[in-house]
Image (cartoon, rainbow, N blue to C red):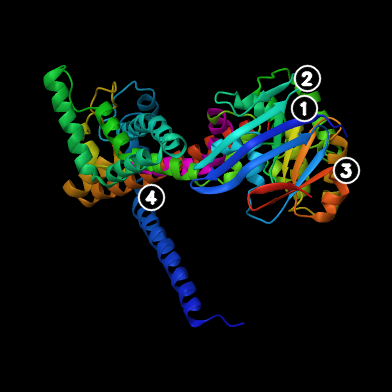
Amino acid sequence: MKKPFFDRLLVAFSWGCALLLISAVSIIIGFLVVKGYKTINLDLIFADTRPLDGLLLKRQVFGGLFPAIIGTLSLILLAISFAMPVGIASGIYLSEYAPANQKWFFSLMVDILAGIPSIVVGLFGFSITIFLHHFFSNRIFPCLLISALSLAFLVLPYIVKTTQTAMESLPFQVRLTAPALGATRLENIIFVLLPTALSDIVSGLVLAIGRCAEDTAVIMLTGVVATAGIPKSIFSNFEALPFYIYYIASEYSDPSELMKGYGAALILLLICSGLFCIAHWIKNTIDQKQRFSY
Amino acid sequence: MTNKIKIQIRDLWFYYNTNLILEDIHLDIRKNCITCITGPSGQGKSTFLMTLNRLWENIDGAKSQGIINIDFENGFEEITVPGYPLPQLRQKVGMVFQTPNPLPMGIYKNVAFPLKLIGEKNRDSNFEKVKTALKKAFLWEEVKDRLTQDASLLSGGQQQRLCIARTLVLNPQILLLDEPTSSLDETSVEMIEQLLVILKQDCTIIMVSHYMDQIKRIADTTLVLSNRQLSKQ
């Protein structure tokens, strides 16, 4: 039977939107690869320093992207380590424990937090630094720790919301299975609900990792600098790839410098893809270990 | 079949929010019998089962009042008193749902899950218990070579027998079954009916079913739930 005109129109529109999305992503990635692949070499990463010396931290790398790569990775790991436990625990609380009125209030707060522009979060981090500097220790300055905490604040809503939604969308019977066998509420969450919702929760974490890797506004106000080298501790300044890309794009003096920016963007993309793969690998490993072994 | 009473229900009322579901139920259920509950859909048959292991407490807006006493071989205990230990109650009063619901784990881990909950850590003894439960549920021969396989890959009938095995692994004294054969093919239905007839020697079975021919085949007592009241047929 022939489909009605409106149905066909809707299908065509959906196809068109999907195609548009795929095209946009392909064009962006293609553009970056075409522009950046020529510049990707050891010189871009280590400049004049011998790669092994740079990797073993025997010599400082000046002019290369290595400190920015390390800075970005440290920033992502720190921010996710702060945001993940708090975000997942809050999501679980909202879906499993919170009474209706509390759930409404906390969900509203999380939505508001998700809507705060990153520059405002950066400004908040900066204000906290000034406050701590004045009232606690004059040795506190914008640093990796403050940046990571601010970023954690920024990505918290993604993790809270995906955890809450993933847990709440589990079918009614799945929720009752373990309690019917004598499981307490906590056992039900740990052994059944969380593992069942793990895939969706990991999707939220992947989103959060992506956001941590790309955000510039927050780190600009809270600790990133153009030439800091590899951060010596969480209280040091640091370099980061998104800031390097922004800096090159706004201040480049010749086309070859701009090309380096494209190279940096491609490296950032590769780092994000690598982290996404690691997140999925960890999820699959936990899954296999928890579910199918004796 | 004995005449000994296993469950006494007195003045049982049940509500979902303001909707009255069960009204003033008085009932005695005999030990080692299959008691079948039938009646029109949406009348509260599943809800009635959930009052016997207090699983309704996991549902928002549900409220129950009344007294339920169960004889767990040491005289009657009132399970409706506040503070009655629910994990222990639910280990003695097992429940199987309408749709097979294997946990997101392998076959072995599914059946061993209740043992994990009660802190049984001896691998050899756990393996024997799992094997016995799977044998009781007529499933051992079909899964013995693939115990680590994802349970959701089993057929519907196998999944339902797995769920029964998972409930049986703790040797419950009462088995609640909520339309356990409604989504299964004829062969699986036959197997589960055979299984229940054997199981009633060791436990008291209360089953919700819509199939009158099935009820005729296996029920010792039949109850009809209609207009919020349970009556003997």
Number of the front mark, 4 or 1: 1
User: For mark 2, what is the residue?
Assistant: B125
Are dots 2 and 4 on a single chain? no
Q: Which mark identifies residue B60? A: none
Residue of label 4: A37
Q: Residue at x 74, y 18 (%)?
A: B74
**Marks 2 and 3 close (CB-CB < 8 Å):** no
Q: CA distance from mark 4 to mark 3?
A: 69 Å
Q: Is residue A210 magenta?
A: yes
- Residue contact between numbered discs 2 and 4, judged by CB atoms under 8 Å: no
Relative to A146, residue B97 above or below: below
Q: CA distance from mark 2 to mark 4?
A: 60 Å
Disc sitting over residue B194 in the figure: 3
Q: Chain of mark 1?
A: B
Say which residue label 1 marks: B171
Q: Magenta stretch containing residue B58, yes or no?
A: no
**Residue A189 drawn at (x, y percent):** 53, 33
Which element is circle 2 on? Answer: helix
Label 1, label 2: how many angstroms apart (C-alpha)? Answer: 14 Å
Q: Which mark sits nearer the N-terminus, 2 or 3?
A: 2
Q: Earlier in the sequence, mark 1 or mark 2?
A: 2
Q: Specify whether A262 is left or right of B79.
A: left
**A50 and A126: which is toward the camera:** A126
Amino acid type, callout 2: Ser
Mark 4 or mark 3, whichever is nearer to me: 3
- Callout 3: residue from which chain? B
Q: Are marks 4 and 3 on the same chain?
A: no
